[in-house]
Image (cartoon, grey):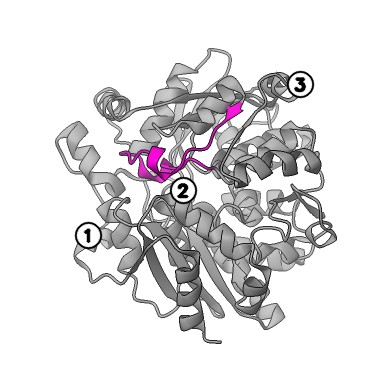
Amino acid sequence: MRYISTRGDSENSSNKTFTEILLGGLAPDGGLYLPESYPQITRTELDQWRGLSYADLAFAVLSKFIDDIPASDLNVLVDKTYTAEVYCNGRAGDNPADITPLRWLEPGLGLLELSNGPTLAFKDMAMQLLGNLFEYVLQKKGEEINILGATSGDTGSAAEYAMRGKHGVRVFMLSPHGRMSAFQRAQMYSLQDENIYNIAVRGMFDDAQDIVKAVSNDHAFKAKYKIGAVNSINWARVVAQIVYYFKGYFAATGGVNGANDQQVAFAVPSGNFGNICAGHIARMMGLPIARLVMATNENDVLDEFFRTGVYRPRGTAETHATSSPSMDISKASNFERFVFDLVGRDPAVIRELWAKVDAGGGFDLSNTPYFANLPKFGFVSGKSSHADRLATIRRTYEKYGVMVDTHTADGLKVGIEKRTPDSPMVVLETALPAKFEETIVEALGRLPERPATMQGIENLPQRVEVMEVSVDAVKQFIELKVGA
């Protein structure tokens, strides 16, 4: 399996192996890595994969994309990652080995529980594997890495918990100052590990993400300070997330062979487009996904595109601070991966479109053949407001006795709107309600339960550097901590 850049204008950006792109994040030409073609899954393989444990299923899926790590080593890494002990915070019921159980709310409508990991968010499903992959590859190469990332809430804590104590790894995580929930801030800022550095920038997530991209595009600085990425611009994050679409599909269609003619719809709360991009790739591989239902919050840039063909990223002043803060994003990095497929994998078109985006603009595909072909990719979209998510949280609790977080509520709201009788609707849970206590109290008048390990986390000492939105300031901080 070889990997290419979505922008494809440099020999250094294409024809790479998995381990060659693992540590780097963005391609040298500023594009994002994708396989040169998607592996296709046969119905026989779908039958064979039914009933596998999550670890065995992950090995089967990842083996399609990773051929430069020996199978025996990859198997060890996957087995080390996907254990009931690692994913012990959740509600796996009578079968704790099922680390991503499907909870049916009613016939044909279910929640795929992805938030049973150490930071109570779906990001743990990929990030825990990424930490083990990084450590494995760095040890093989005898190298170190300085990870630079940006978070709107959950990526940061998932990355830090996955990388804390890892040999040869430092983490520099940017977050929007004062924009995350108190729980999210405490999860990150209370870590005292020497290899973890938190930087709060006085802006929105998009400002933090722009800094990460600017540093990554400074090739001399990136090489000197061995800068790597854990955001979903990192291909390994996306490929690891493909696994739970297969798991959710099998759970939704029963545990017997021959069920693989049934199609399933997935509803996905979407901010940076990484989670639903994994579903897109699973569908391109041949997983019978009827529809990918993308839910946004008030920051509805992506919903606008899928309805109109116009991609119009907002600036900081136009980006709303909402009660589903992990989706307060107006420039979705992984969207470039999907558009690459939409325009027939033509890197020249991507370079033209993203030249406009990188210059602060957008683009309009509404009157092009590309937009006319959009329906074949199975996407539908909708958005949710604060009032919507409060109503959804209340209705879900009163009707089903299930408490959901604000982002999952967005997915449920739009998923129910777009639900059709021809296929089950599986809504991807993205976090536990404990991470967003203020809104849960507003909706239900009571506090959500939280794991014992997270009791009183807001009262722990916190360690964070607050900075203005400045690429130079972040570079100087990295230089200071790493040394010349």
**Residue at image mark 2:** 122
Circle nearer the viewer, 2 or 3: 3
**Residue at image mark 3:** 369
Q: Residues within 10 Å of mark 3 (few under 14, many from 20)?
A: few
N-terminal-most mark, 1 or 2: 2
Q: Please state if 251 lies on the left or on the right of 72 as rendered.
A: left
Residue 310 against residue 26 in the figure, above or below: above
| Res. 99 visible in picture | yes
Q: Which of the 4 quarters of the picture holds residue 156?
A: bottom left
Most extreme residue toward the left, as rendered?
445
Residue 287 against residue 151 in the figure, above or below: above
N-terminal-most mark, 3 or 1: 3
Amino acid at the residue labelled 2: Phe
Q: Please state if 304 lies on the left or on the right of 406 as rendered.
A: right
In this rendered view, identify the residue nearer to me: 111 or 480.
480
Q: Give the percent coordinates (x, y) of residue 191.
A: 34, 71
Residue drawn at x 50%, y 32% as measured from the top left: 301
Q: Give the percent coordinates (x, y) of residue 472.
A: 49, 69
Contact check, label 1 and label 2, Cβ < 8 Å = no
N-terminal-most mark, 2 or 3: 2
Q: CA distance from mark 1 to mark 2?
A: 20 Å
Q: Please state if 445 lies on the left or on the right of 146 as rendered.
A: left
The local secondary structure at tag 2 comes to loop
| Res. 116 visible in picture | no
Region rendered in magenta: 310-331
The N terminus: image quadrant: bottom right
Predominant SS of the magenta segment? loop
Residue drawn at x 52%, y 66% as measured from the top left: 148
Q: CA distance from mark 2 to mark 3?
A: 35 Å
**Residue at image mark 1:** 455
